[in-house]
Image (cartoon, rainbow, N blue to C red):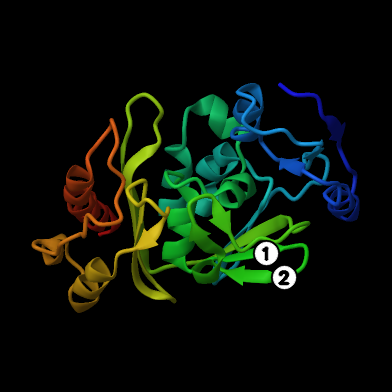
C-alpha cells in the first residue's frame, strides 16, 4: 500500500469535511477499496472511515423497505422483516460473496462502487429504489450511469436506500464459481414501478434494464413469455469466463428462472 492519512469522523458533517481533501476516499465495509489499495491501484491522500456514523438498520413500512447505508449484506439476508416484505432482496443479499464478505460489506458501499457484476444495483433498478444522500434523493433510473459510475458528486455520501415493496419479485444469478460474482444476474419485479427486469454481470456498462423482457412479461407474467425474446450481444461482456454470445443466452435462461421463482 501507499501511505495515506486515516480519519474516522464521528458525524456526517465531519465526514463530508474530510472528503474535501484532495484524493480522499471513503471506506465503508472495505470489500473493494482494501484490495485496490493492496494492489497499489489507488493512491488516496486520506481514507475516510464511515463506520462510526451509524447509518445502519432496517425499517419496513406498508409501502417500502428502508435500509441504512452502512447495513451489512448479512443483516439484510437474515432480516425477518425483509424476508416478509421483499423476499427477493433478502435472497440477493445472501448470495453476495462469502460469509466474510457479507458480514463486512455494506449496501451503501456496493451501490456507491457500482461494480458491473454487483448484485444490489439490479435490485435498486428493478424495484425503482431511491438512493438518499446527505444532500438529496436520487431515483435509481438516474443514479446508475455506467461501469463504476454513478450520479454521486464530490462530498456526497449515501445515507439510506428506499425500496418500494413489489407485488412479486425474484433474483437469480449464474455466478462465477470462484469469485461468486454474477456472470449474469437477473432481478424481475412487478410493483409500483411496473414490470421491470434488470441484468447485472453481463453488460459492459454495468446494470441495465431489459426492455424486451419487460414488454413480454407485461403482456403475460410467465416464464414462457420470454421464449424467443432476444438479448443483443453488442454491449455484453466477453472475457475468459464467458463470451458475449453465451451471456446473451444466459440472460434468457436466468430470467426464466427468476420469473418462475417470483411465482
* Residue hosting label 2: 136
**Quadrant in the rendering for residue 252:** bottom left
Number of numbered discs visible in the structure rendering = 2
* Label 1 crowd (10 A; few <14 / some 14-19 / many >=20): many
Q: Quadrant of the C terminus?
A: bottom left
Residue at the (56%, 40%) spot, across then down: 73
Residue at the (64%, 22%) spot, across then down: 38
Q: Quadrant of the N terminus?
A: top right
**Residue 30 x, y percent position in the rendering:** 66, 33
**Residue 113 x, y percent position in the rendering:** 58, 47
Q: Is residue 176 above or below residue 56?
A: above
Q: Is residue 254 left or right of residue 1?
A: left
**Residue 71 x, y percent position in the rendering:** 65, 45
Q: Is residue 230 above or below residue 253?
A: below
Find the distance from the CA under tag 2 to the CA under tag 1.
6 Å
In the image, 219 versus 48, the foreground residue is: 48
Q: Secondary structure at mark 2?
A: loop
Residue at the (81%, 36%) spot, across then down: 45
Q: Secondary structure at mark 1?
A: strand
In the image, 67 versus 117, the foreground residue is: 117
* Residue hosting label 1: 132
Find out whether the residues at labels 2 and 1 contact each other: C-beta distance under 8 Å: yes
* Label 2 crowd (10 A; few <14 / some 14-19 / many >=20): few
**Residue 88 x, y percent position in the rendering:** 40, 52
Amino acid at each position: 500500500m501507499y501511505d495515506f492519512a486515516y480519519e474516522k469522523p464521528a458525524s456526517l458533517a465531519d465526514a463530508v469535511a474530510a472528503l474535501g481533501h484532495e484524493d480522499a476516499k471513503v471506506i465503508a465495509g472495505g470489500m473493494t477499496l482494501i484490495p485496490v489499495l493492496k494492489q497499489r491501484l489507488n493512491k488516496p491522500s486520506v481514507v475516510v472511515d464511515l463506520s462510526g456514523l451509524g447509518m445502519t438498520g432496517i425499517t419496513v413500512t406498508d409501502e417500502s423497505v428502508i435500509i441504512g447505508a452502512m447495513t451489512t449484506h448479512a443483516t439484510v439476508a437474515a432480516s425477518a422483516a425483509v424476508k416478509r416484505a421483499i423476499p427477493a432482496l433478502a435472497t440477493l443479499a445472501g448470495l453476495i460473496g462469502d460469509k466474510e464478505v457479507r458480514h463486512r460489506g455494506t449496501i451503501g458501499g456496493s451501490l456507491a462502487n457500482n461494480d458491473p457484476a454487483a448484485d444490489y444495483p439490479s435490485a435498486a433498478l428493478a424495484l425503482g429504489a431511491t438512493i438518499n444522500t446527505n444532500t438529496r434523493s436520487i431515483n435509481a433510473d438516474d443514479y446508475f450511469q455506467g461501469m463504476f459510475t454513478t450520479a454521486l458528486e464530490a462530498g456526497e455520501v449515501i445515507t439510506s436506500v428506499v425500496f418500494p415493496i413489489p407485488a412479486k419479485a425474484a433474483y437469480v444469478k449464474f455466478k462465477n464459481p470462484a469469485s461468486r460474482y454474477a456472470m449474469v444476474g437477473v432481478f424481475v419485479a412487478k410493483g409500483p414501478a411496473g414490470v421491470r427486469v434488470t441484468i447485472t454481470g453481463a453488460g459492459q456498462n454495468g446494470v441495465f434494464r431489459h426492455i424486451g423482457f419487460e414488454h413480454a412479461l407485461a403482456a403475460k407474467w410467465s416464464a414462457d413469455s420470454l421464449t424467443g425474446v432476444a438479448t443483443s450481444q453488442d454491449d455484453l461482456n466477453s472475457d475468459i469466463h464467458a463470451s458475449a454470445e453465451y451471456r446473451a443466452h444466459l440472460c434468457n435462461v436466468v430470467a426464466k428462472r427468476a420469473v418462475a421463482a417470483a411465482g
